[in-house]
Image: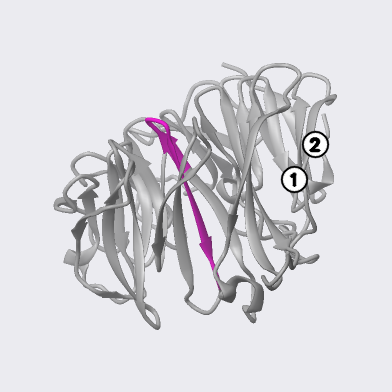
Amino acid sequence: MLLPEAATKGRTNLAGQVRGGGEDLPVLLHQERAFVVSPTGVQVIDLADGRVVGEETARGAVLREDADGFVLPPVLAGSEVLVPFLLTMPASGTHTAGAMVELVAVSTAPPYKAAWRTTIKLPEWASKASGKVKVAAVGAEGGAAVVTVTGSDGEAVSYGIDTVSHALRWTQPGLEAVHTGTGMAVGLLHAEPLTYIPIGVDLATGTEKWRGEKTYAAIMDAAGPDTVRIAGPQVDEGGDQLLDVTSGKARATMPPGLRSFGCTYDRASTLVCTPGFAVVAVDAATGKQLWALKDGDGQGRTPPTVTAVWHGRVYGRGAGGPVVLDARTGADMPTKPEVAPLLVNEFAGLVLDDNRLFSYPAGG
């Protein structure tokens, strides 16, 4: 079943690969539906037959016409999917034109229409930025949602929005939030060019609760419900750490050799990392290495190209075709898959073929 072109538009390279991998596609899988986002709207697709069962459109002109390829996936917030759009804000009275975010909450139940909408005026840099501006719905919890906007010149701002009143609760200039959980929003404060400070703010009020040390070229990613990973090519091996989101204190140090490479949380208990031509699995709670597959390590196995990780399974393409590994042990699963999905849930897997995304029913 073919998904709309918006699912991959501007996302593939000349080799037919998706830049950033499946986690960055503008698609959210929820049960038997796919929410596919474009710069101007969102379509709800039935994964069984490909029908468009719902659709919502942004109420305004897009900030940039060439924004395909920079749209991030929406997030689930209870019974709603939060979809942010970057739009222009027309001049009104004595107020000059500018940029804004429209946040649309689309119901996960038929007829999949907007439950509510709200708009937030953006700082002046958003409409004058020389490069791409990105917006991300980071997450929601306890009646508060977080939206982050970043520019290509180091600009950032994060907002806390009340999901009941739809009013703006707080604003944190300079904060690129990456995770919400346990009453906190956590991210990187853009302090100086290419220099960041990990901070955590109260999800309800935006009040800063903790602040870490300045880190050059830092990266931060979610590593569990209440954990983030802070790393980067400029830190030493001891600086690649898993942080508690409520305190900012280090819970564990990651194994050596991974600090310049991304790891994906399987939404269960494991981080799967792909340093070079290898696959390494790490316990998300302790930072301990569980297993590794590397070329030439004498195991008689070739590491696969990882396409997705989800709920204790690692999906990829091996020497003999698609494979599935046990995320905790690295062992090949007994059931041989027919395809290597970029995104997967309990109902379906999404597979790239000739630069288009197709849905296949999940098995086993």
* Distance Cα–Cα, label 2 vs label 1: 7 Å
Q: Image height check: is 14 above or below 105?
A: below
User: Mostly what secondary structure, the magenta segment?
Assistant: strand
Q: Indicate the quadrant where residue 237 lies.
A: bottom left
Q: Which residue is mark 2?
A: 3
**Residue 206 appears left or right of 76:** left
Where is residue 292 drawn, in percent x and y? 33, 48
Where is residue 271 drawn, in percent x and y? 35, 43
First to last magenta residue range:
139-151
* Nearer-the-camera pick, 201 or 66: 201
- Find residue 7 and name its label: 1
Q: Is residue 357 visible?
A: yes
Q: Are there few (<14), some (14-19), or many (20+) residues within 10 Å of tag 2?
A: many
Q: Are marks 2 and 1 in contact (CB under 8 Å)?
A: yes
Name the amino acid, label 1. Answer: Ala
* Nearer-the-camera pick, 176 or 315: 176
Q: The C terminus is located in which quarter?
A: top right
Q: Regarding mark 2 in the picture, which secondary structure is present there?
A: loop
* Nearer-the-camera pick, 155 or 127: 127
Q: The N terminus is located in which quarter?
A: top right
